[in-house]
Amino acid sequence: MKPGQIKRLYTEFGTEIALSSVCASSFKITSPWKHRCILRYLKETYSGFIAGYKQELSKKDSTVSETKDMVSGTPAPIWTMWWQGTDHLPELVSMCYASFSRHRGDHPLIVLTRDNYQEYVSLPDHVMDKVKSGAITITHLSDLIRFALLSRYGGLWMDSTVFVSDRLPEDIFTAEYFTVKRPLTPKNGNVAQDRWTNFLHAGQKGNLLCRFVFDFFLEYWKTQNYLVNYFLIDYAINLACDEIPQCRKLLDAVPLMNDDLYRLEHMLSAKWDPAVFEDIKKHALFSKLSWRKGGKKQTSSGEETIYGHLVRIT
């Protein structure tokens, strides 16, 4: 961690969070300590918010959503975002969007940008002021936006660097809540512990888990000017499941799947082989990629690579 980051964590959140974050950045074995410190801080700092949520839930059954789609009878939407606009897509992002389109069925694909996001979501002034000041980055604004959309409309959110290898099952759109949940990966240092992925969420309109996370973000940014951790989205979901039994029930109902999330990323520059790609598809409906890495279109001997093939059919 950079000295400026350490100083800011100490100033904003105290010694324990600063020290545990420094240790975890160098020694992954200390990550559980950092997670405990951050979650304890969030639970204590936002105890009033959590208590208010629990009180409201005690008055009604809020596990079940309000309606299933944006408009009754229409297919639930697929949401994604590229802030700069669709005229400025990196090649790999275009490849991923093409995979969305090929496999979306009747579900509309809606790409949010800085020019159109306000047509779908309205965020309070205290949030937008911090976006303008840079306290909230575009990356973390997208965290707010995805849960605002799922709370208000329902549907499926996928980050713009997710590759879809086959037709999207309707079970994803009819589930009360869905994410990619995998068996725990050894030495995983993230607080999510493979129980969810932050780049793919789905749910019905009014879904409690999505609504809690969105409302928590709004509450957090009322008083904070700095992230307690880059992956605040994961701590918010963990908080929801620790404190709200209905949220834990929703997450527990998500089936295990997708044990090869990153295999495609590691093989993009390998020679194109239909049999290999079929095997990737068999074990990964969703693959997480990085637009900064991409891949080579040809091998050193001039043969088409997996990346080259997928870009060509975009």
Image (tube, rainbow, N blue to C red):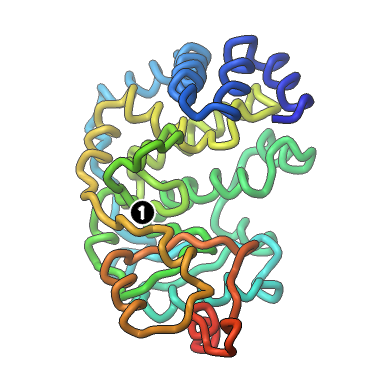
Q: Quadrant of the N terminus?
A: top right
**Residue located beneath label 1 in the image:** 202
Above or below 279: residue 150: above
- Tally of numbered discs: 1
Q: Position of residue 216 (x, y in %)?
A: 49, 30
Residue 48 in sight from this viewpoint: no
Q: Position of residue 126 (x, y in %)?
A: 68, 33
> Which of the 4 quarters of the picture holds residue 228?
top right
Above or below 165: residue 52: above
Residue drawn at the location 33% of the way across and 38% of the way down: 208
Residue 241 in sight from this viewpoint: yes
From the viewer's perspective, tell me whether residue 141 is left or right of residue 29: right
> Which of the 4 quarters of the picture holds residue 20?
top right
Q: Position of residue 202 (x, y in %)?
A: 36, 54
- Specify the amino acid type for callout 1: Ala
Question: For this rendering, which residue is in front, 61 or 277?
Answer: 277
Q: Residues within 10 Å of mark 1 (few under 14, many from 20)?
A: many
From the viewer's perspective, tell me whether residue 45 is left or right of residue 141: left
